[in-house]
Image (tube, helix red, strand yellow):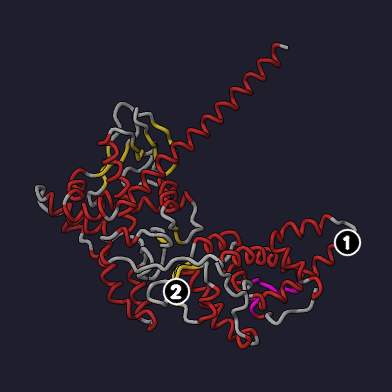
Amino acid sequence: MEQPSSHVLSDEMLQSENFLLASVVRPLERLLESGCAIIQEKAVRELLTGLAYPCDDGKHWVASQRLLDGVNELGSISQLVAAVLACDSQFRQPWLNLMAARCQEASELSEPLQLVERIHQLGAASEWVEASLAEASLSATPYSLIERELLGTQADSIGALPILTRVLTTAYQLSLWRGQALPVIASTALQGQRPDIDWVKGRLLPVPKANVKYNPYLLVSLSSSYSSSRSTETSQSDDSDHHELGQQKIGQNDFNQQAFDNLPLDATKTRSDLALDWVLSSPWALLLAAITYEQDIWSSEGLGGLMLELPAGQNGYKPSLVQVLVLNRDGDEVLCGSLAQFVSRILVELSMALFPAAISTQELDQQLGDVIELLIKRQVWQHRDGISGELDYYQINPQFADACYRMKGQRAFALYGKKLREAIRTQALRWRQEQESLISAAHSTNTSNTSAQFLKDVF
């Protein structure tokens, strides 16, 4: 594969910090803050090759897991932007000259371990620094304004050393990835009826309470701030062409709960069809519904399955924690972890990612409680009381299950949702195997310790 050019920023950009800020830094910040953004500057698009997914409209780009991991590792969007800038060989050269000079300083100290530690921290980026030793310099760079904004201080200050080290280390890895172009992403399907189009490699799923603008290349979350999204979107001319599509997508927020609750008791088909329409237009509802749909099928096969169990003390209608247990064909259960952990594993299986990626498992479990509350209200999930001292649990509501087996539901779950369901079962089985291995290893360790103690006591 041909490696992209390492020098993509024009001399005009590099000679004007204000131009660089406006045309490169700001678009990168928007991309990382929202997960998807229009990238107009050709040089920025070249920088993002292998680091973000191009979209089929030729305008939008979606942040990849590679970039999201970089934000987590560096601890800030601004430092990750600095690392992306440093993928340009000409831009990073003054920083490498500084780092080379700092390494020379360390080599002259009486304590050689400081140099060893510095090289160790640089990792593979030490290759860049070594090549710059002949140009080593502690002089200020031409990018003091950008450095103060992205690094918090000028690069030539001693306080910038640990930050610059991390940025260059990340930049080296990003530069390697630039040789691995990512596939083009298509826009999401209208009304969410095509999981095979929506749940694909590179797609970002905003967490349930993410405050993100509507974008046709993101799986907009159930609890996102849709009203503010629409007003903001219409004020931006570059995204105005997607406004009508956005209104269709966010029509899920028009679900009339009161009318739903007031339906006659025997209007089960009408009720479940309304619930299905809502689920198909709500990515988080669809994902959790697909889990219980697969749970139902798996149970009917008699070949194992999974349980969604409610720990003691949890609110059954809005839990902050749901436990996932995976069963083998004999019905033996293994507690694997939380629902948030399971969701994260499913997305990894699909080569998708949560946005923002920094959300903790505990926080995601809490946010899923809001989704579960609506699933129960709209009779998609059913809360069941445990029998004979067993814990309460969740399963698909029988009426909603009927809707899933009618034509519209069959297309969405059985046909177009096949890959999503496969990811659910694959990860459940793999998770159980991993937990069994951990249990076995722990048992072996305990047995060894017990044997050693026995021999010690005897002799």
Of residues 304 and 134, the one nearer the viewer is 134
State left or right for residue 153 relative to residue 187.
right
Q: Which mark is residue 109?
A: 1
Is residue 351 one of those drawn in magenta? no
* Mark closest to the chain's N terminus, 2 or 1: 2
Is 156 covered by the magenta stretch? yes
Residue 405 image position (x, y, % from top left):
19, 48
Determine contact: label 2, label 1, CB under 8 Å. Answer: no
- Disc 2 marks which residue? 37
Label 2 is placed on what type of residue? Ala
Question: Where's residue 93, x and y in %?
Answer: 71, 75
Left or right placement of residue 200 versus residue 16 in this view: left
Left or right for 9, reference 199 = right
- Which quadrant: the N terminus? bottom right
> How many labels sit on residues?
2
Q: Residue at x 25, y 67 (%)?
A: 251
In the rendered image, the quadrant that contains the C terminus is: top right
| Local SS, label 2 | strand
Residue 108 or 282: which is nearer the viewer?
A: 108
Q: Residue furthest right?
A: 110
Magenta-colored span: 146-157
Q: Which residue does the image show at 58% across and 70% down from the upper left? A: 3
User: Nearest the camera: 218 or 145?
Assistant: 218
The quarter of the picture where residue 297 lies is top left
